[in-house]
Image: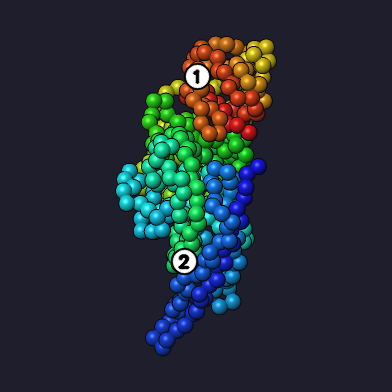
Amino acid sequence: MKTIFKSTILMAAAGLFVLTSCEDDNESNPTIAQPTTFVLNQPAVNGNIDLEKSSTVALTWSQPTPYNDFNAPVVPTYTVEVSPTGSFNKAFDVNAEDNTGADFFALEETYSSGNNVELNAETLDRMLIQLNGWNEPSKVPSLIDLSFRVKAAIRDASFREYNPIYSNVVTMKTIPYYIELKPADPAIWWLIGADIADGSWGGDMAKCVIPLQTVDGAEYDKKTGDGEIQWIGYLGGNGFKLRGALDDGWAVQIGQNDGGYVKNDGGSGNITVGEAGLYKITLNTAELAKAKDGENTTALKIEKYESSAPVFDGMAISGSFNGWSDTPMTPCSSGWENHDWYISYTFAASDEVKVKQADSWDYNKGGSFVTYSQGMYVYGESNGPNLVIAEAGTYLIIFNDITGYIRFIKQ
């Protein structure tokens, strides 16, 4: 059984926002004073924190209101920063080509409510390995002094940070361990909107939102998974957007603004095309990572698809699990021309499967899976080899009949 180490962090505000004005100030634009730091208590930990034997490192704090606009409290966003040296001079950036001199990392997850935080021990260890370049077991030290501090900042509707303040630094004896880092999964972005799937703007995968696909033969950054992803299908001109995640409250998105495409602007409009038809949507996530929030980006391209594409009445999965008969897939779109299909199915290990046209083998796709953390994908080959299920389980299968791309998402 893994151990959970409880650490207690008391965040006490050094001060509050105070609104003041002088004779020359306009009353509608008061001067704002704010706290400059807050107290982070030394955690009470018995012994060393063994990251391999721990599932989480739990942090607890009392959460006063460190920012206040008179009677209207302003809730800050907290970010945990971690350093193996005790210095916080340069942050490690997974998107940067050169991290020379980086001496700390900020955990991706942020907090704005509650007083219990559980930091994933494996995530801490993986970040330490990346930051320090420990590429073999012998390079991982047996014990380090791991330093923590917390940043508090106010975020606006576009998630830009203002007025950050930092706690003092606390240090804990920590035992890291070696993990062989695998290349990052290709980045996933999702299409959503009145032109996508059932057009409901809902969050159900395949039924309401469709993932962009990797491009056959394209290369993806081993650290970040960034590269070029695409989707080809029918757009009716009713509007859509792109989301970077389905569980972030629309924090990461792409919309349209003054004819251009804009990143992470909560007020942006829906993306529309002037004429209904088949389109190719291409997103370069490496280029997008360089764009600033709220600014237009050229990372997204939407072009008419000039090749022809057959429209199928039905699609199915077939294989050893059903005697090579047809188990029908569901069209993602039913109100307009459909080229995306889905089904959720439970397989046994070693089951063989293909995706095919309903009631016919004239059109069928097989091949060899590429595995990733959430399942598998394949650039389907016409009349290709049977796909072999390595790990038993329930998978959501999403298929595009234009590109032949098949994604298996483990449920």
Q: Amino acid at mark 2?
A: Asn
Q: Is residue 394 visible?
A: yes
Q: Is residue 76 visible?
A: no
Residue 291 or residue 88, whichever sits in front: 88
Q: Quadrant of residue 26?
A: bottom left
Q: Which mark is residue 276?
A: none
Residue 141 or residue 73, whichever sits in front: 141
| Element on which disc 1 rests | loop
Q: Position of residue 63 (x, y in %)?
A: 59, 67
Q: Residue at x 59, y 21 (%)?
A: 389
Task: Give the mark, 2 or 1, whose residue is nearer the N terminus.
Answer: 2
- Mark 1 nearby-residue class (10 Å; few <14, some 14–19, many ≥20): some
Query: According to the image, label 2 marks what residue?
Result: 168
Residue 403 or residue 249, whichever sits in front: 249
Q: Position of residue 122 (x, y in %)?
A: 53, 44
Position of 134 relative to 368 (above/below): below
Position of 313 relative to 144 (above/below): above
Query: According to the image, label 1 marks what residue?
Result: 368
Q: Amino acid at mark 1?
A: Ser
Q: Are marks 2 and 1 in contact (CB under 8 Å)?
A: no
Q: Position of residue 197 (x, y in %)?
A: 58, 35
Q: Position of residue 217 (x, y in %)?
A: 39, 25
| Element on which disc 2 rests | loop
Q: Residue at x 48, y 45 (%)?
A: 176
Q: Quadrant of the N terminus?
A: top right
Q: Residue at x 57, y 28 (%)?
A: 408
| Residue extending farthest bottom | 23
**Numbered disc in front, either 2 or 1:** 2
Marks 2/1: CA–CA distance: 52 Å
Picture mark count? 2
Q: Residue at x 42, y 25 (%)?
A: 216
